[in-house]
Image: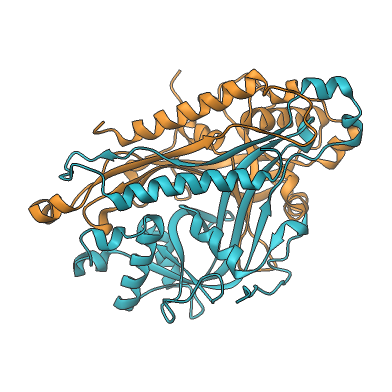
Chain colours: A cyan, B orange
């Protein structure tokens, strides 16, 4: 099935370099879910400066939990651990919920050209605009917490002590953000150059140009002081090694030339 | 010299887990400068949702360029490549400039405990609130562009074709953000656990707990199609290998136990 798209409106339409833009569910949701941290921004009526919080979260849909995020409508679920302020605001946000903007950005490489003016970065970024409300129903909270836990490390939820006690569940807040609009921006490729620089043989013989790919490297796990398991469990090691390999491949694929 | 601090006010004071908070210049500025991408957020009067843009930038002070960011007042300089909208807003922001919030977050590890409720992340994040204005004076623009280029890759500015032509300089926008307030939040250490879980021998024998450290890995550079230099220049390789080693060390140091 083709991936549906968010409608282009004045809110989400990319002004600069629109050819780098993407609006389809597959691109937008995959970037949100690949980003281990999300930046959540909302207006604080007490200050002229928006509030920005780093939070953990991912996309999902409680009404249709088996649906593929690439082709189906998704909400963003946020784990409220970080901020009491946000959740208070969420409660006061009225029926529609608190308007917020969620940003995810992943760096894939540093692009070096003959002159700093043409330097760039390979990256994937997604922005989702939506209305946040606290999730009050227990089954949906459990669904969202499972999703968020396993989005970071697949199978961790069922491989550890779950479900939470009701006291734990009471003290954990989950926000559901109904997406009103969203877009993504992806930059790939090598350096672009100025025509004049390309004619300067001495410059070209002196300045290395290309891409330094970058990705998240997950290192050998360090057991906690109270850990009682001798070997790191295979699903953790499998995930770690797989993520490193996928990250490496993606960063090199983004270069799209050479190698 | 001790590092001065941003004053604690209702704007920047951390509500939750205040013991993770830091307000000193050294911590705040170093996190802003260590983050290859910054998230810049400001209010868009046309929409209820804040605008969030991933941007490149770093701290500096044109009036005192040799001052140490750990001990001296800094502005945030942003490279305006990404958004015309922002720079238009900046121009209209009045004398004080456009109020904005700048966020930098770096993930150092995934912290796994016996139960998802106690899972956490090791991270460093900084938030700076300030007023942004376009930098109009050419020497300050050159200063800021040099700083931003070399903050990503030291010596790149002077090792490539610089300064920019006046046409390039005209078409590049730089914003100076005067910091009104700022704070940082740093989480380090291993997992914390529930007392009851620690008494459950079967659980402890089954679930691995600890930290999976994570850092940015810069891979072997890929030459561009038009590159004319056979070997990657030593300052690039030195930076790359050094960053990887520093990132690794920092992520393991953040664990603070085991190993």
Counting labels gives: 0
> Percent x, y for residue A188?
69, 48
Q: Residue at x 69, y 26 (%)?
A: B62
Residue A136 location, quadrant: bottom left
> Percent x, y for residue A81?
35, 58
Q: Residue at x 49, y 60 (%)?
A: A33
Seen in the image, is A218 located left or right of residue A50?
left
Residue A195 location, quadrant: top right
Q: Is residue A165 above or below residue B124?
A: below
Seen in the image, is B209 located left or right of residue B84?
left
Q: Is residue A115 above or below residue B182?
A: above
Q: In what quadrant of the picture does the N terminus of chain A appear?
A: bottom right
The answer to whether one can see residue B4 in this image is no
Q: In what quadrant of the picture does the C terminus of chain A appear?
A: top right
> Percent x, y for residue B233?
67, 21
Q: Nearer the viewer, residue B41 or A245?
A: A245
> Percent x, y for residue B190?
27, 41
Q: Is residue B243 above or below residue B112?
A: above
Q: Residue at x 34, y 43 (%)?
A: B212
Seen in the image, is B50 located left or right of residue B111?
right
The answer to whether one can see residue A254 in this image is yes
Seen in the image, is B144 located left or right of residue B60?
right
Q: Residue at x 50, y 56 (%)?
A: A34
Q: Nearer the viewer, residue A144 or A242?
A: A242
């Amino acid at each position: 099935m083709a991936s549906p798209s968010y409608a282009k409106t004045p809110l989400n339409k990319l002004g600069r370099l629109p050819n780098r833009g993407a609006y389809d569910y597959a691109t937008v949701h995959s970037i949100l879910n690949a980003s281990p941290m999300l930046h959540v921004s909302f207006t604080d009526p007490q200050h002229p400066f928006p509030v920005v919080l780093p939070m953990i979260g991912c996309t999902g849909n409680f009404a249709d939990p088996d649906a593929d995020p690439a082709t189906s409508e998704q909400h963003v679920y946020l784990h409220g651990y970080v901020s009491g302020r946000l959740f208070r605001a969420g409660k006061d946000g009225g029926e529609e919920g608190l308007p917020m903007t969620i940003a995810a950005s992943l760096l894939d490489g540093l692009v070096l050209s003959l002159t700093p003016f043409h330097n760039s970065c390979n990256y994937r970024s997604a922005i989702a605009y939506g209305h946040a409300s606290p999730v009050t129903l227990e089954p949906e909270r459990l669904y969202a917490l499972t999703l968020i836990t396993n989005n970071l490390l697949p199978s961790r939820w069922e491989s550890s002590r779950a479900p939470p006690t009701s006291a734990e569940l009471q003290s954990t807040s989950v926000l559901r953000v109904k997406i009103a609009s969203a877009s993504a921006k992806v930059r790939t490729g090598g350096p672009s150059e100025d025509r004049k620089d390309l004619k300067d043989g001495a410059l070209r013989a002196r300045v290395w140009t290309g891409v330094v790919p970058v990705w998240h490297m997950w290192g050998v796990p360090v057991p906690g002081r109270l850990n009682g398991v001798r070997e790191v469990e295979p699903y953790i090691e499998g995930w770690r090694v797989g993520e490193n390999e996928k990250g490496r491949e993606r960063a090199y694929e983004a270069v799209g030339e050479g190698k």
